[in-house]
Image: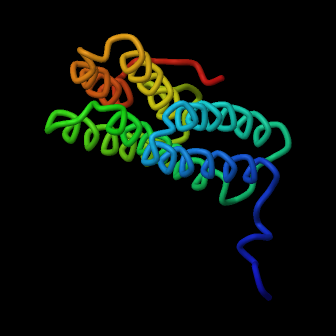
Amino acid sequence: MLFNQLRTLRFPDMLTLLGLLCVSTSVYYSFTGLIVVAYILILMQFLLDYFDGKLARAIGGGVLGIYLDSFTDFMAVASSVVFGWFLGIDGIAMLIAGFLNLGAASIRLAYFTAYKQKGFTGIPTVLAASAVSTIALLGYLFAQEFLNWFVIFYFISAIAMVSDLRLKKL
């Protein structure tokens, strides 16, 4: 049979894939300089991630849903790093902070995929990506002369993802 893999997908998985399309397209718009569009797409993925999880818990998710969700969440973090870079937060500090964000997201997502838990510890990856993108955009719009200092928020984002801060699952 053709397309057995596609037959395993459920409606919540389609929302997850739409979120993946959003963050992938966000990277493209970051490259082209349409940063407001790139930012909106990062926020759209945040909303889609919230609703795909709610829907999956309500009607049941597909077998692949957990893995698709983790991959899409990782891509949200990657797109937020690219977004910051193209806003003008660059240099070796951003290179290090970007790697730390990707590493922290990888560890966090692998951990929560392997070990099921009732609540969260640390800031969820998509929340971290959305928050740091928002802060970076505000810096770009209102404090451009200090923009390279905004790399600090990328370091904080990486630390927050793997911290022991306890949060309730929404």
Measuring 43% from the left and 40% from the top, which residue is drawn there? 77
Q: Position of residue 107 (x, y in %)?
A: 36, 44
**Coloring basis for residues:** rainbow
- Residue 134 against residue 91 in the figure, above or below: above
Q: Position of residue 140 (x, y in %)?
A: 37, 21
Q: Quadrant of residue 147?
A: top left
Q: Is residue 8 left or right of residue 133?
A: right
Measuring 62% from the left and 52% from the top, which residue is drawn there? 21
Q: Is residue 97 left or right of residue 136?
A: left
Measuring 16% from the left and 33% from the top, which residue is drawn there? 93
Q: Quadrant of residue 4?
A: bottom right
| 119, 65: nearer the viewer | 65
Quadrant containing the N terminus in the rendered view: bottom right
Quadrant containing the C terminus in the rendered view: top right
| 118, 56: nearer the viewer | 56
Q: Is residue 90 left or right of residue 27?
A: left
Q: Is residue 145 left or right of residue 69?
A: left
Q: Position of residue 96 (x, y in %)?
A: 19, 39
Measuring 28% from the left and 40% from the top, which residue is drawn there? 98
Residue most toward the top? 142
Residue most toward the right? 59
| 89, 61: nearer the viewer | 89
Residue most toward the bottom? 1
- Residue 113 against residue 126 in the figure, above or below: below
Q: Position of residue 83 (x, y in %)?
A: 41, 37
| 27, 161: nearer the viewer | 27
